């Protein structure tokens, strides 16, 4: 790989931009596909988008020989709102799955390094912490506090972002009330429908760890375009 291509890959990762490295195997020529290149209506762009969506390389036949398309997506991130019991197994499982996890909770007695080793802790107020987190297309947001004073401000910020997964714990009644409050903040029905509530797949989960499994499974299904 040339220094120029390597510098471009590093810059794209730092800026959290998805790119694809296209290599023509017959000649060894390589080109980075990004931005408008990925939006074009042509076979190489279609295959590049598929490579990014599936997080795995694609091999595309062409008149100039096979093209190897290697995707470089920004790293996955997960913001967990509330340093509650469910957050502990969820943070651990999400980290193992490849997420960079941030725990957001102003209650410093709960959000501690002892309870959440090896993850980022943010003790700011949720709306400020979420703005600092800056969720994007590779971000999952999970609200666990059951406290509208904490969950609602963070969900308000999340709904204004391109986060691929937004979820909140609570009963159907609690979720309905949550949607009414967020609607009063100007969010329409289509936007509010992005919130998965109650969070997680309906697998009969009971324990904190089982609930964490259901949430991570739902996030994975959404990421891969296979929502249950």
Image (tube, grey):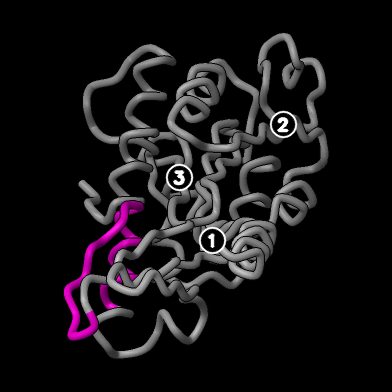
User: Alpha-carbon distance for marks 1 and 3?
Assistant: 41 Å
- Judge left or right: residue 176 versus residue 62: right
Q: Residue at x 65, y 64 (%)?
A: 3
Secondary structure type for disc 1: loop
Q: Earlier in the sequence, mark 2 or mark 1?
A: 1
Secondary structure type for disc 3: strand
Proximity of marks 1 and 3: CB atoms separated by less than 8 Å? no
Q: Earlier in the sequence, mark 2 or mark 3?
A: 2
Segment colored magenta = 46-64
Dot 1 crowding, Cα within 10 Å, few <14, some 14–19, many 20+: few
Q: Nearer the viewer, mark 2 or mark 3?
A: 2
Residue to which mark 1 is pinned:
1
Above-or-below relation of 223 to 78: below
Percent from the top left, x then y, of residue 134?
68, 57
In which quadrant will I find the N terminus? bottom right
Percent from the top left, x then y, of residue 12?
62, 64
Q: Nearer the viewer, mark 2 or mark 1?
A: 1
Secondary structure type for disc 2: strand
Q: Nearer the viewer, mark 1 or mark 3?
A: 1
Camera-nearest residue between 168 and 37:
37
Label drawn at residue 89: none
Residue to which mark 2 is pinned:
120
User: Alpha-carbon distance for marks 2 and 1?
Assistant: 33 Å
Dot 2 crowding, Cα within 10 Å, few <14, some 14–19, many 20+: some
């Amino acid at each position: 790989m040339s220094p120029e291509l390597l510098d471009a890959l590093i810059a794209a990762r730092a800026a959290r931009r998805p790119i694809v490295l296209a290599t023509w195997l017959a000649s060894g020529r390589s080109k980075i596909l990004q931005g408008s290149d990925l939006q074009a209506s042509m076979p190489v762009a279609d295959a590049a988008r598929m490579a990014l969506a599936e997080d795995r390389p694609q091999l595309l036949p062409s008149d100039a020989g096979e093209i190897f398309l290697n995707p470089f997506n920004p790293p996955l991130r997960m913001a967990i709102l509330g340093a509650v019991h469910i957050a502990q197994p969820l943070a651990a499982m999400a980290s193992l799955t490849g997420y960079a996890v941030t725990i957001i909770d102003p209650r410093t007695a709960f959000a501690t390094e002892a309870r959440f080793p090896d993850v980022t802790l943010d003790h700011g107020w949720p709306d400020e912490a979420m703005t600092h987190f800056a969720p994007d297309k590779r971000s999952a947001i999970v609200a666990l506090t059951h406290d509208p004073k904490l969950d609602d401000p963070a969900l308000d910020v999340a709904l204004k972002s391109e986060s691929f997964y937004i979820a909140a714990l609570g009963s159907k009644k609690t979720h309905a009330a949550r949607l009414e409050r967020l609607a009063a903040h100007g969010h329409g029905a289509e936007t509010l429908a992005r919130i998965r509530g109650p969070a997680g797949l309906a697998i009969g989960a009971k324990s904190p760890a089982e609930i964490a499994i259901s949430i991570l499974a739902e996030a994975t299904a959404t990421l891969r375009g296979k929502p249950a």
